Image: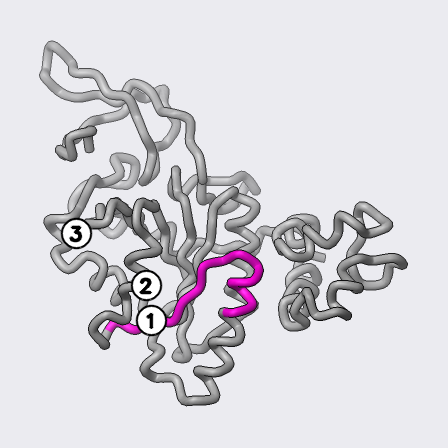
Amino acid sequence: MDEAGQIHRAMPLSKLPQLVAGDLVECELDSGSSALRVVSLIDRDGVLARIDRRGQPKPLAANVSHLVIVSASKPGIDSLLIDQFCVAAELAGIGAMIVINKQDLLDEQQLAQSKNMLDTYRAVGYPSMLVDTKTPGQLDPLIDALSGKTVVLVGASGVGKSSIVQQLLPDQEVRVGAISAATGFGSHTTSVTFWYQMGNGGSIIDSPGVRQFSAAHLSAEDVRNGYRELADASINCKFSNCSHRVEPDCAVQTALADGSVAQWRFDNYCKLADETA
């Protein structure tokens, strides 16, 4: 897509790295064939990547501003999975939003628990909201939050990511902004990656690879640094590599005791750190 919003197809030069959805490129017109060629890749920012079989990061999407982490009572609100994505976003320099979908299916107790959990995420600095796709106006807070942002929706299967995208893009065919040349062309190929332009200046990147994104490659140090409130408190820990469990003069333990760090967030931190051991 050019600056005027027109869609063009361009083939990248073979010397370029594999392009992904969200990449910004420079193109030149081939005078002989009148075809556009991608001649250079503009430096990426906000790269969402997964670790390949060789242990190397493989970019899935570029210039992403936020992960939208979607959860729902069915199949289940998993705060550990939400935290895992938050940590991955933090380490990638990408913002995160927490969305609990299908709020219309929550009973009073579940609703209260969900609101308390979202309050904790907001206190840490993550925009968080309850939505549903069936009640008119219930997606408005998310639409407003996505204005001007480039986002990727992540979350477990069945939480309603596709339903949210359909509501955000009611006329999907008209709103397709570009298709990644690196992953194929045409809406019927299984490997196709789409970049969707929303009417509020925001955009959504969707691909099979992004939907399968996992943060399972995190190290224990990644986990320590990826919890915002723990990282902030740890500045005052006696030891720079404090695990926040058994060391003396641990500022995180102090914050846990005075309630400035939520116990359930700390418990999730311990679980994720243990999984990396």
Residue 99: quadrant of the picture: bottom left
Mark 2 or mark 1, whichever is nearer to me: 2
Magenta span: 119-133
Amino acid type, mark 1: Val
Q: Which residue is mark 3?
A: 188
Depth check: give the residue in front, 39 or 79: 79
Q: Classify residue 168 by image quadrant.
A: bottom left
Q: Is 31 left, or right, of 72 in this rendering?
A: left
Hey, which residue is sitting farthest bottom in the picture? 108
Q: Earlier in the sequence, mark 3 or mark 2?
A: 2
Q: Earlier in the sequence, mark 3 or mark 1?
A: 1
Which tag, 2 or 1, sits closer to the chain's start? 1
Q: Residue at x 30, y 73 (%)?
A: 132
Which residue type carries mark 3?
Answer: His
Q: Is residue 266 above or below residue 106?
A: above
Mark 3 to mark 1 CA distance (whole Å): 30 Å
Would you name the residue on which mark 1 appears? 131
Q: Mark 3, residues whose alpha carbon is within 10 Å: few (<14), some, or many (≥20)? A: few
Q: Quadrant of the N terminus?
A: top left
Count of labels in the image: 3
